[in-house]
Image: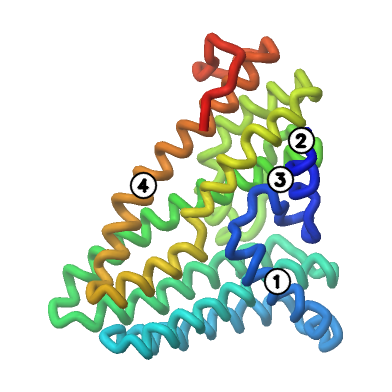
Amino acid sequence: MHKSATHTAAGADSARPEAIEDPSNLWLVHAMSWRLLPLALRLDIHPNTVSFTGMGFGLLAGFCYWHWQSPLFVVAGFLLMVGWHVMDGLDGKLARASGKASPLGRVIDGMCDYLAFIFVLAPIALSFADWQPVLALAVVSGLFHAVQSAWYEAERDAWKRRLTGNFVTPIRPPGPAIAAAYDWVEARFNAAHRRMDAALAAHPGLLPRYLDATAPLVRRLSILSANNRTVAIALACLAGDPRLYWYWEIAALTVIALVMGRRLRAREAALASSSGTVLGQDTCSQGTLPKD
């Protein structure tokens, strides 16, 4: 593995390797959550409390975005959303550091994330005089958001798991109904993961090349992250038409995700082909890797 990839893959937080992390998380969000972690541990705050606090920031941000016509309210809403991102980074760190991580906590974290966006976007939609079609647009956009985010997290989780040498695509044990529903969407994207896992299991020596070759592609998927959606909401409001955000989410992010996903699968297929492993129907005839 190249020195740079080796270094960045072993960041301070093993759950969030630097090699694939969103730069805004590295430079701002998680830097702030790391600073808050000792205080949260000292006060024995439960991780779920942090998740709900973040959701509260989202609720306050929604009040500000109700007045999206005012740039000052948009800036205030944006900063409150940054506060939610910090809480969203802190709850996972706190759960791992305190030994309080649980399947239910993971679901609460995910649900609070989606609710934070609903609390922000619903008031924006309802602020329009003809709010019915705008709300319908927001609902459709939310469905695209859910699928895009599930795919993004599935790709990141697969890369992080392989980084540890685990080449078994996980099957989560049965849990509460809400947890099963939450996991179902993400599990739909695991077919391609199983093919790559089989290739790595057959040729473990391929792992360093896999990590170096795919890390840049996985990192670029962060355009689908919640951080960048938060920025896009603020920019659309400052541009004078919040509907631009929903158009961006439905059309542009979907196309971007499809293109990036195809490139990632092609890169994996080329790696497997170079080791003599057939990877489903995506195997390249050449052993060389596709260019970025």
The image shows residue 262 at horizontal and vertical percentages of: 46, 32
Residue 72: percent from left, percent from top:
37, 90
C-alpha gap between disc 1 and disc 4: 30 Å
Residue 254's disc number: 4
Of labels 3 and 2, the one closer to you: 2
From the image, tell me which residue sits under label 1: 31
Question: Nearer the N terminus, badge 4 or badge 2?
Answer: 2
The residue where tag 2 is placed is: 2
Amino acid type, label 2: His
Disc 4 from disc 2: Cα separation: 32 Å
Sooner in the amino-acid sequence: mark 1 or mark 4 = 1
Query: Residue at label 3?
Result: 160
Is residue 240 toward the left or the right of residue 157 in the image?
left
Q: Nearer the viewer, residue 222 or 198?
A: 222
Residue 21 sits above or below residue 73 on the image: above
Using the rendered image of the protein, determine whether residue 184 is visible from the camera's viewpoint.
no
What percent of the width, then of the height, locates residue 115?
Answer: 47, 73
Indicate the amino acid at tag 4. Thr
Which three-letter amino acid code belongs to the residue tagged 1? Ala
**Amino acid type indicated by mark 3:** Lys
Q: Residue at x 82, y 88 (%)?
A: 43
Per the image, label 2 sits on a secondary structure element best described as loop
Q: Residue at x 62, y 64 (%)?
A: 25
Find residue 111 and report its horizontal and vertical position in percent. 54, 68
Badge 1, how many Cα within 10 Å: few under 14, some, many 20+? some
